[in-house]
Amino acid sequence: METIILATNNKGKVKELKDILNGYEILSLKESGIEIEVIEDKDTFEGNAIKKASEISKLTGKICIADDSGLCIDALNGFPGVKTARFLGEDATQDQRNNYIIEKMKGIKKENRTAQSVTCIALVQPDGKQKTFTGILKGYISEARRGQNGFGYDDIFETEEGITLAEMDQEEKNKISNRRKALDKLLNELGGSL
């Protein structure tokens, strides 16, 4: 079985990707003994994902998958977008980011709280070939944080059914998430195998 390096140490992403790609041997950077962090300085999710996957693939000589994900809020002109993890600075916590967004959206009616959770996955092979796959989950920013599961913005991202991703168990979330949609495209492209 071909080993695929996953260009992240984000525990939530690692678990989600391993659960969905359970037919493959997936190793995080830490599990691969890699201690570099690729700077995400591109203007698009696609650019960041390609940069991360390319650098790690070159370093390891193995197939590499990287993703860049973010929250795009329509009422805020797509904010925070590609800067989703960094818009309050490098030292801000996820709690601080989620609370900031809840505060920023205060008083906005439900129909105007629409948002998209976006994932772009880049697959880079050792010969430099690369492909990207984008998954989008549409929903709303909730009025308050709800749920104990998941990570990132899961407790403020409400599906069209009215529950947040953090109120779902991992299995439910993995069926509908933006990451799942991107991975399904990747698997379809590869015909289920590398």
Image: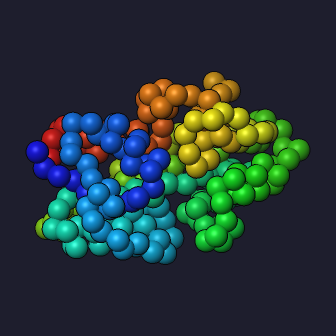
Depicted 100 relative to depicted 126: above or below? above
Relative to residue 71, is residue 95 drawn left or right?
right
Q: Residue at x 35, y 71 (%)?
A: 35
Depicted 189 relative to depicted 9: above or below? above
Q: Residue at x 69, y 53 (%)?
A: 95
Check the picture and name the quadrant holding the N terminus.
Answer: top left
Relative to residue 163, is residue 65 drawn left or right?
left
Q: How many marks?
A: 0
Relative to residue 169, is residue 49 drawn left or right?
left
Q: Residue furthest right?
A: 107
| Residue 130 seen in this snapshot | no
Residue 117 in the image: state x and y as whole percent: 56, 46
Residue 158 in the image: state x and y as whole percent: 65, 35
Can you tell which quarter of the image residue 150 is in? top right
100, 49: nearer the viewer = 100
Can you tell which quarter of the image residue 159 is in? top right
Q: Residue at x 60, y 60 (%)?
A: 84
Residue 193 in the image: state x and y as whole percent: 15, 41
167, 127: nearer the viewer = 167
Q: Which residue is drawn at 22% across and 73% down?
A: 59
Residue 36 in the image: state x and y as whole percent: 36, 74
